[in-house]
Amino acid sequence: MENVISIRNLTKTYGKKRGVSDVSFEVHEGEIFGFIGPNGAGKSTTIRSMLGFLNFNSGSINILGMDSVKDHERILRDVGYMPSEALFYPTMKVSEVIKYAADVRKVDCREEAAKLCERLQVDTSKKIKELSLGNRKKVSIVCAMQHRPKLFVFDEPTSGLDPLMQNTFFELIKEYVEQGTTCMLSTHVLPEVRRYCDRAAIMREGHLIKTDTVENLIATSAKNVKVTADGETKEYMYNGDINDLIRELGGQHVENLTIEEPSLEDMFMHFYEGQEETK
């Protein structure tokens, strides 16, 4: 399986401010790859370094078989990028923005753009300044998808979209991926990762914590425990044998004990909160 994205030892610093440090991972051809972590984890810095919008300090990035620095312009021809914030000239009409995005690439995208606008219910006659955040997001989606790129890179794409449009957005992604496109999805919406992604990389505080299949990442024998003992209530995730837990509590006066399967958020949270880093 070919790697559409290959990042090796990427480091980007902002003086005293945190960037990313020694980040390495691959995105395989034809997969939907989740890039997850809390806000400020380094996801956007990594993406902007990938696409040549930031000069990084060290490491190497290969996109679609090309060097991200030397072949920056060639790479962008085959990438559909959607930033976390969709900013356009406010007085332009939606139709003008979509055409402008196509003209920059020197590609006739009218047929694909029309299909996308219909699916996403985009009113092309309105001016950008008349649109809500969600409708600006939809325009950004059209601009990223209309040239049928080999690689999608989406940074927090569904914020501002209503649930119906979120479903439509992922339906479109799956359709393009079935036709050969690869997708990298940066998000902190964990149910999206579970539902749509094949593999994922977890970022925390500028470091890559783990990369694996989503199935493996959420597989855990851990349980959420809430115990009231000796007048004190504690809540925590327990990773050991439940029988060991019972023995540990044996010397206490237990007033209440609840043991539950962890939520999806809880299963990922231990990656976010200072567990030992692994690759």
Image (spheres, rainbow, N blue to C red):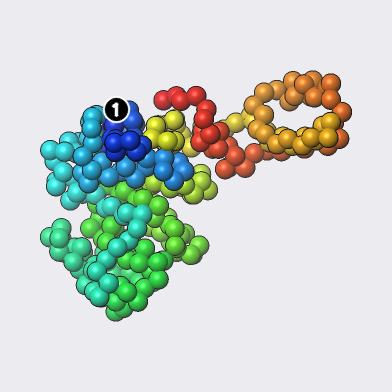
Query: Residue drawn 57% across and 43% down?
Result: 265
- Observer-nearest of 31 and 53: 53
Determine the residue located farthest toward the bottom in the rendered image: 125
Determine the residue located farthest toward the front in the rendered image: 16
Name the spot of residue 54 as percent of width and height, x first.
23, 43
Quadrant hosting residue 204: top left
The answer to whether 31 is drawn above or below residue 2 in the figure is below
Q: Which residue is mark 1?
A: 9
Query: Residue drawn 50% across and 62% down?
Result: 163
Quadrant where the N terminus lies?
top left
Query: Residue drawn 45% across and 41% down?
Result: 37
- Observer-nearest of 195 and 46: 46
Quadrant where the C terminus lies?
top left
The answer to whether 27 is drawn above or below residue 91 in the figure is above
Q: Residues within 10 Å of mark 1 (few under 14, many from 20)?
A: some
Secondary structure beneath dot 1 equals: strand
Amino acid type, residue under disc 1 in the picture: Asn
- Observer-nearest of 212 and 262: 262
Tell me, yes or no, if residue 194 can be seen here.
yes
Name the spot of residue 220 as percent of width and height, x first.
60, 31
Residue 219 as seen in the image, left or right of residue 66: right
Query: Residue drawn 24% across and 69% down?
Result: 89
Residue 67 as seen in the image, left or right of residue 232: left
The answer to whether 9 is drawn above or below residue 70 in the figure is above
Name the spot of residue 45 as percent of width and height, x first.
32, 42
Tell me, yes or no, if residue 179 can be seen here.
no
